[in-house]
């Protein structure tokens, strides 16, 4: 039997971060997939390469397809868009009309993006991705001071903000990896990490920390903090998607507001860890069960399983569809 062909239009930056790798892997199980890095060629070259590949489906990861550059000239009219909540922009009226005309489908890994595309009449599927748990047996502190890890990826969420969120008296040390050359006079002990660590040393770092600070105010999927959760490390994250779609504040991790204040106060990692581990194990099992529905949705078939939730924080089993 001939396998379907998927043209996967990704971003150049994701070649380094590998944040699209998980989706490529599960689609490669059921289709012949070819990656097209959007920035690697101009618009005409991209269209020519896709048409030469002659796909059955064309998938756009993060950035939506353009009307003139993609929807009109690409011969395959089966389009899928995988929007990301970080940096998300609403579609203009003209693009919404063309998306509806070409029946563009949206695979959403954030409930916020799902609500938006559903409200503008798109066929959409929402599912949450949970990495495989790799939880080490260790003892967590039940009272401060705590050791935190911060990978600073935005100037607006740095050491000073973390101190404001947690409280200087509650911090023993911050292990800092920064994408910025920022001079600071910290009021707490800092352990600076090099720009790059071998994987085994990076994993060993997780055994030293009590909390992982989610590095951005919004996420598309959130693999950085999901990796910490999958290792049983409580996360401190901004009360925004996708952090607040995985975190139940004060139960499995902690959320802070726009004023850099913890919503439920400082709960010890020892108290958070049992619910966190249970949620990650359950969530991963639901993700494994959802993979066939994701594959079917991308290929243009009806999802095998669907369910809807009216709650503001969907249950771990949430797999939502709108046609």
Image: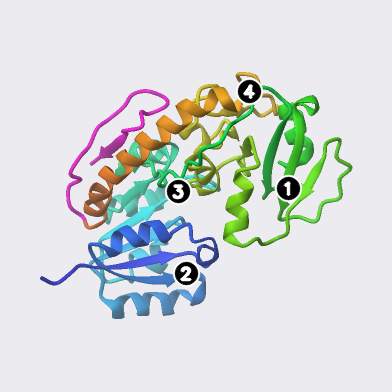
Mark 3 or mark 4: whose residue is earlier in sequence = 3
The local secondary structure at tag 4 comes to loop
Quadrant showing the N terminus:
bottom left
Instruction: Tally the numbered discs.
Output: 4
The prevailing secondary structure element of the residues shown in magenta is loop
Residue at screen point 38% across, 36% down:
281
Q: Is residue 1 above or below residue 67?
A: below
Q: Is residue 148 above or below residue 14?
A: above
Q: Nearer the viewer, mark 2 or mark 4?
A: 4
How far apart are labels 4 and 1 at the CA level?
A: 23 Å
10 Å crowding of disc 3: few (<14), some (14-19), many (20+): few
Q: Nearer the viewer, mark 3 or mark 2?
A: 2
Q: Position of residue 119 (x, y in %)?
A: 35, 36
Whether residue 14 is visible: yes
- Give the quadrant of residue 259: top right
Mark 3 or mark 2: whose residue is earlier in sequence = 2
**Mark carried by residue 38:** 2
Residue at screen point 41% across, 68% down:
69
The local secondary structure at tag 1 comes to strand
The reply to whether the magenta stretch includes residue 177 is no
**Mark carried by residue 15:** none
Quadrant showing the C terminus:
top left
């Amino acid at each position: 039997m001939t396998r379907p062909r998927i043209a996967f239009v990704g971003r150049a930056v994701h070649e380094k971060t590998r944040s699209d790798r998980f989706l490529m892997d599960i689609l490669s199980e059921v289709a012949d997939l070819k990656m097209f890095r959007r920035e690697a060629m101009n618009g005409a070259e991209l269209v020519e390469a896709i048409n030469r590949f002659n796909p059955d489906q064309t998938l756009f990861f993060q950035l939506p397809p353009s009307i003139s550059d993609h929807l009109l000239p690409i011969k395959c009219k089966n389009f899928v868009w995988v929007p990301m909540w970080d940096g998300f922009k609403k579609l203009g009226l003209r693009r919404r009309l063309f998306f509806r005309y070409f029946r563009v489908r949206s695979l959403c890994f954030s409930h916020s993006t799902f609500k938006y595309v559903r409200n503008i009449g798109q066929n959409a599927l929402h599912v949450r991705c949970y990495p495989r748990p790799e939880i080490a047996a260790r003892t967590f502190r039940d009272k401060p001071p705590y050791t935190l890890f911060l990978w600073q990826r935005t100037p607006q969420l740095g050491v000073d903000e973390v101190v404001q969120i947690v409280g200087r008296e509650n911090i023993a040390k911050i292990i800092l990896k920064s994408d910025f050359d920022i001079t600071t006079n910290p009021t707490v002990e800092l352990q600076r990490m090099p720009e790059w660590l071998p994987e085994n040393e990076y994993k060993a770092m997780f055994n030293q920390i009590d909390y992982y600070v989610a590095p951005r105010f919004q996420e598309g999927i959130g693999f950085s903090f999901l990796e910490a959760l999958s290792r049983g490390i409580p996360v401190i994250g901004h009360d925004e998607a996708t952090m607040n779609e995985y975190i139940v504040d004060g139960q499995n991790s902690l959320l802070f507001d726009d004023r850099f204040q913890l919503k439920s106060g400082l709960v010890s990692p020892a108290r958070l860890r049992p619910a966190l581990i249970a949620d990650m194990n359950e969530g991963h099992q639901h993700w494994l069960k959802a993979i066939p529905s994701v594959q079917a949705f991308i290929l243009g078939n009806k999802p095998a399983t669907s369910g809807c939730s009216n709650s503001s924080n969907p249950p771990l089993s949430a797999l939502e569809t709108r046609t």
